[in-house]
């Protein structure tokens, strides 16, 4: 029983820890979105990309500096799963406004930058 | 532009279209398994753009009111699920490409973009400026 619990914890803890890092990066991006949504469309899109890429890069630079639970690719893949989970939970169950941002420019490209930021951080540290 | 909605769209045709495209790309890439990286990676990107483009252009001809974002999201989820089932659980280590940024992340982004823009171009009514 103790052994099974320990095995579960050795898998669960790294996963949850990675998820916390994704949560921190996501909150940083949301802070930007909430404060700067009044910018002109051009500057909003530009800064959105920079903030998403930068936030995920910096948070995962810290992560990869201290931890190496998974390979760089696996870390990026798991991070993206957590990102999708956060987005689904928040925008499906906690948000009641228009989902205007679910388009190529405001969602698909930023997710690509987030994945690239995580991968770049791992690559740099490795 | 209307907000994407899962309720208005049948998921099965999207999943089938995604699996057909993904399976075709994987099949073609098996022929290039021993090719050098500078051949295999551009070929992977090219086949991904071509096959996802053809299949999803056909999909949007049949389902003219399908929403591009919903279609892209469901197709990508099916793509990733197929990757996990085939190359991680069923045949580990047998994937015809490597799990790296250039050989996996870029082709996935290309596939997502092609699925989305096939929808922007071919759905009716058209979505302009997105």
Image: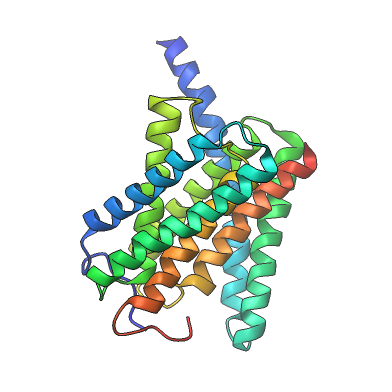
Residue B95 or A101: which is nearer the viewer?
B95
Q: Is residue B71 left or right of residue A119?
A: left
Residue sitting at 56 percent across and 33 percent down? B33
Residue B33 or A76: which is nearer the viewer?
B33
Classify the position of the C terminus of chain A by image quarter: top right
Q: How many numbered marks have been drawn onto this rendered protein structure?
A: 0
Residue B51 or A104: which is nearer the viewer?
B51
How are the residues colored?
A: rainbow
The picture quadrant where one finds residue B61 is bottom left
* A91 in relation to A121, above or below: below
The picture quadrant where one finds residue B91 is top left
Q: Residue furthest bottom?
A: A40
Residue sitting at 36 percent across and 55 percent down? B75
* B1 in relation to A7, above or below: below
Classify the position of the N terminus of chain A by image quarter: top left
Q: Position of residue A38 (x, y in %)?
A: 59, 86
Residue sitting at 42 percent across and 58 percent down? B52
Q: Is residue A57 left or right of residue B128?
A: right
Q: Position of residue A22 (x, y in %)?
A: 58, 50
**Residue A78 appears anywhere in the view:** yes
Q: Position of residue B116 (x, y in %)?
A: 43, 68
**Residue A98 appears anywhere in the view:** no
Q: Position of residue A77 (x, y in %)?
A: 54, 43
* B11 in relation to B25, above or below: below
């Amino acid at each position: 029983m103790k052994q099974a619990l320990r095995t579960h914890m050795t898998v669960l803890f790294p996963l949850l820890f990675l998820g916390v890092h994704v949560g921190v990066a996501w909150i940083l991006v949301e802070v930007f979105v909430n404060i700067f949504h009044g910018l002109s469309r051009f500057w909003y899109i530009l800064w959105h990309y920079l903030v998403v890429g930068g936030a995920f890069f910096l948070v995962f630079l810290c992560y990869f500096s201290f931890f190496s639970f998974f390979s760089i690719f696996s870390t990026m893949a798991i991070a993206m799963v957590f990102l999708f989970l956060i987005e689904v939970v928040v925008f499906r169950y906690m948000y009641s406004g228009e989902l205007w941002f679910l388009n190529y420019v405001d969602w698909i490209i930023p997710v690509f930058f987030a994945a690239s930021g995580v991968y770049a951080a791992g690559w740099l540290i490795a | 532009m209307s907000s994407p909605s899962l309720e208005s769209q049948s998921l099965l045709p999207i999943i089938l279209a995604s699996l057909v495209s993904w399976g075709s790309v994987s099949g073609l890439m098996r022929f290039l398994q021993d090719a050098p990286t500078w051949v295999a990676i551009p070929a992977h990107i090219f086949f991904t753009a071509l096959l996802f483009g053809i299949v999803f252009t056909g999909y949007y001809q049949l389902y003219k009111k399908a929403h591009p974002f919903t279609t892209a999201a469901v197709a990508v989820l099916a793509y990733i699920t197929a990757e996990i089932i085939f190359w991680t659980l069923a045949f580990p280590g047998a994937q015809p490409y490597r799990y790296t940024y250039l050989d996996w992340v870029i082709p996935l982004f290309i596939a997502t973009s092609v699925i989305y823009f096939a929808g922007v171009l071919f759905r009716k009514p058209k979505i302009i400026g997105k």
